[in-house]
Amino acid sequence: MKVGIIGAGTMGSGIAQAFAQCDAVDKVYLCDIKQEFADGGFAKIKKQLDKRVAKGKMEQAAADGILGKIQTGLNDICTDADLIVEAALEDMKIKQDCFRNLQDNIVKNPDCIFASNTSSLSITEIGKGLSKPIVGMHFFNPAPVMKLVEVIAGMNTPKETVDKVKEISVALGKTPVQVNEAAGFVVNRILVPMINEGICVYAAGVSDIEGIDTAMKLGCNHPMGPLELGDYIGLDIVLAIMDVIYHETGDSKYRACPLLRKMVRGGHLGVKTGIGFYDYKDGKKVPTDKE
């Protein structure tokens, strides 16, 4: 099986690694809008594998085999792909334009499956006006490690496509959960409003950053508190998902906290920018309200 991954950021590179580690996959095309972005995604994968080799968790030959399956480039290298997994920006127009170009101009395999890793957008809307159906294949970060894949059917997604994606997920060592299309699907519909509520609790002065995260870790046995998790996901992503759920449902309980919106406007997005609720600069992690 040949797989094209569209978008070489954190999620895209992780998904590419997950496929390259699968025996059923012969080739992985890791693509982005610039060669340097695709090469950057490849470098992230190599760094992760190098760490595993250094710790004795993987043989060098195995790491070399995984890397040897991956080819970087622009989207036009995906001509013979059997599966496309789009992991571009969480923007409806970008995703629609990407799929339209792939289907109309690039992919020549008539049996190719087109899947989106969207974390909240409508699969039906993404596929509107396209020549071939779209299916949701939502991985979780870090994709090579996390076991869940949400498989989402839009109104026009054939059952056989959904079933095939579930089979592929199992071959990757993942557990697929079929989800009816709804804003945020299952995990983000529950998780992201919890993060948003944690931000509201902090904005209201109920406790400090460490206090809120510690309370949820020790009181609910969560591995991360909501503010730390928001930083890890990216506060811009958290805001985008909240806005999608709010606009899709019209329910005020999904309205984004004003502090979240303010932080995104200020570029305080979390780990990816070095500062969010915690400051990650100089290799440290310090709550910003303790600086």
Image (tube, helix red, strand yellow):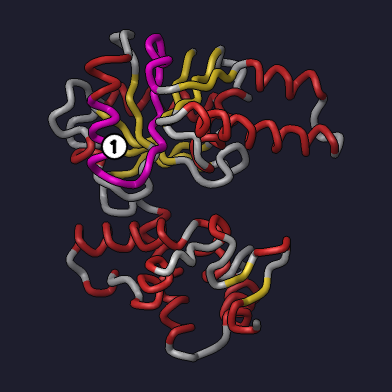
Residue 250 makes an appearance in the image: yes
The image position of residue 194, as x and y in percent, is: 43, 69
Asked whether 216 or 98 is in front, the reply is: 98
Q: Seen from this angle, which residue lies furthest left? A: 129
The reply, left or right, for residue 60 in relation to residue 92 is right
The reply, left or right, for residue 283 in relation to residue 72 is right
- Residue depicted at 51% across the width and 37% down the height: 175
- Residue depicted at 54% across the width and 47% down the height: 141
**Vertical position of residue 260 compared to residue 5: above or below:** below
Q: Which residues are magenta?
A: 75-100
- Residue depicted at 56% across the width and 15% down the height: 24
Report the amino acid beneath label 1.
Lys
The image position of residue 191, as x and y in percent, is: 44, 62
The reply, left or right, for residue 262 in relation to residue 245 is right
Residue count near mark 1 (Cα–Cα under 10 Å), binned few <14, some 14–19, many ≥20:
many
**Vertical position of residue 23 compared to residue 214: above or below:** above
The image position of residue 2, as x and y in percent, is: 48, 14
Residue of label 1: 95
**Vertical position of residue 125 compared to residue 35: above or below:** below
The image position of residue 260, as x and y in percent, is: 40, 72
Asked whether 148 or 274 is in front, the reply is: 274
- Residue depicted at 59% across the width and 61% down the height: 274
Query: Does the magenta-highlighted stretch encompass residue 82?
Result: yes
Q: Seen from this angle, which residue lies furthest bottom? A: 205
Does dot 1 land on a helix, a strand or a loop? Answer: helix
Residue 219 makes an appearance in the image: no
The C terminus sits in image quarter: bottom right
Q: Quadrant of residue 48?
A: top right
